Image (cartoon, grey):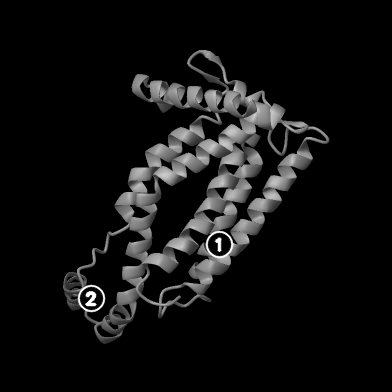
């Protein structure tokens, strides 16, 4: 069963679809045939801007975890043979430092429905019983409904360009993640090295979804990279 066929969710999806259609009409004089693509980018930026309070909460939580990381490491070394004592000391540290071990996770869960709704807009061939015209619109020689594996020549070049741009963003994201690893963390550990490549999963995913969805992914990943860099400078209590 498609969860987006559930009436309240379907109504929300149709509302967002109408909003994008209105944005496309608004920017048509400037963007021409690329109006729908520009509307997708604008919608993504608006949604991410509205989610700024969530991002701020996440960055603050990340900064607090970095602040107490050396103390946690000391506890782990001291009580590594006493798991029960370690757990008690760890929770006591969180309480003393007024830091929640779950800080940042709730905001992530809260933004998931919003992001899922926006993303679903670019994957459904029909919305509200009518054809999703976003997927039949053009961006240069490519249709927004085509993927890197279905776009013909020269439309595939548009997809390749977007994937290349996303790869650059993913590379910077991985580099940042390795540089900002928590104190005491072994960035060369196998698990850490595997997780550091996670940003490239969005590039792989973008290769299989419609161009409209790839535009969304490209915009939101670039926003995330820039946003986190700015917020860390603003809210972290220690130099990076």
Where's the N terminus, which quadrant?
A: top left
Residue at the image point whose x is 55% and y is 62% from the top: 173
Q: Which residue is mark 2?
A: 83
Residue at the image point whose x is 63% and y is 33% from the top: 37
Q: Which residue is mark 1?
A: 173
Q: Position of residue 48 (x, y in %)?
A: 46, 45
Q: Look at the picture and state if 36 lies above or below 41.
A: above
The local crowd at label 1, few if under 14, some if 14 to 19, many if 20 or more residues have their Cα within 10 Å, is many
Q: Position of residue 15 (x, y in %)?
A: 43, 23
Q: Which one is earlier in the sequence, the residue at label 1 or at label 2?
A: 2
Where's the C terminus, which quadrant?
A: bottom left
Instruction: Indicate the quadrant where residue 155 lies.
Output: top right
How many numbered discs?
2
Q: Is residue 128 left or right of residue 237?
A: right
Residue at the image point whose x is 38% and y is 76% from the top: 238
Q: Secondary structure at mark 1?
A: helix
Q: CA distance from mark 1 to mark 2?
A: 34 Å
In this orientation, which residue lies closer to the viewer: 65 or 234? 234
């Amino acid at each position: 069963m498609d969860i987006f066929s559930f009436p309240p969710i379907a109504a929300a999806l149709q509302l967002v679809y109408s909003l994008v259609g209105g944005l496309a009409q608004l920017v048509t004089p400037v963007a021409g045939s690329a109006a729908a693509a520009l509307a997708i980018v604008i919608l993504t930026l608006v949604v991410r801007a509205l989610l700024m309070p969530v991002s701020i909460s996440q960055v603050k939580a990340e900064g607090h975890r970095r602040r107490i990381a050396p103390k946690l490491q000391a506890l782990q070394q001291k009580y590594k043979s006493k798991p029960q004592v370690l757990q008690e000391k760890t929770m006591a540290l969180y309480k003393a430092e007024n830091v929640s071990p779950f800080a940042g996770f709730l905001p992530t869960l809260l933004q998931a429905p919003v992001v899922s709704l926006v993303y679903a807009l670019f994957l459904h061939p029909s919305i509200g019983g009518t054809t999703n015209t976003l997927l039949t619109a053009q961006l240069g020689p490519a249709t927004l409904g085509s993927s890197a594996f279905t776009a013909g020549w020269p439309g595939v070049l548009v997809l390749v360009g977007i994937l290349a741009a996303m790869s650059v963003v993913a590379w910077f994201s991985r580099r940042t993640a390795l540089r900002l690893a928590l104190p005491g963390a072994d960035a060369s550990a196998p698990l850490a090295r595997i997780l550091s490549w996670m940003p490239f999963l969005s590039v792989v995913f973008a290769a299989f979804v419609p161009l409209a969805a790839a535009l969304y992914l490209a915009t939101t990943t670039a926003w995330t990279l820039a946003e986190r860099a700015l917020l860390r400078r603003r809210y972290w209590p220690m130099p990076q």
